[in-house]
Amino acid sequence: MPSRPDYVVDLADGAVEQWSFRVHPPARTGDLAWTRRIIGPDGRTLEVWHEVADRAGRVVHSHRHL
């Protein structure tokens, strides 16, 4: 991940959950984007979620990588 995550949560199985948030400029469709990444105990990325929500809170874009 190029920048530091906003939140880091240690999970019971030794993995780490990282959350990153980014606010889009007003001209863009989404108002808030976030990425949730699960890093295994061995340092490998296990899963990545990415979502973008509009100003009303509706998710307008979402995908998950395993």
Image (cartoon, rainbow, N blue to C red):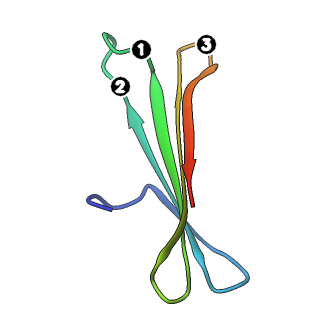
- Residue type at numbered disc 2: His
Query: In the picture shown, does residue 7 fall above or below 62?
Result: below
Residue occupying the point 61% across, 13% down: 56
**Sequence-first tag of 1 and 2:** 2
Q: Secondary structure at mark 1?
A: loop
Residue 47: x and y in percent read 56, 63
For the residue pair 42 and 4, the one nearer the viewer reads as 42
- Residue type at numbered disc 1: Thr
Query: In the picture shown, does residue 38 fall above or below 63?
Result: below
Which residue is labeled 1 in the image?
29
Tell me if label 1 and label 2 are in contact, CB under 8 Å: yes
- Residue 22, image quadrant: top left
Which residue is labeled 2 in the image?
24
Quarter the C terminus occupies: bottom right
Query: In the picture shown, does residue 49 fall above or below 14?
Result: above
Which residue is labeled 3 in the image?
56
Query: From mark 3 to mark 2, how far is it between C-alphas?
Result: 14 Å
Query: From mark 1 to mark 2, how far is it between C-alphas?
Result: 8 Å
**Sequence-first tag of 1 and 3:** 1
Residue occupying the point 55% across, 41% down: 63
Mark 1 surroundings within 10 Å by alpha-carbon count, few (fewer than 14), some (14 through 19), many (20 or more)? some
**Sequence-first tag of 3 and 2:** 2
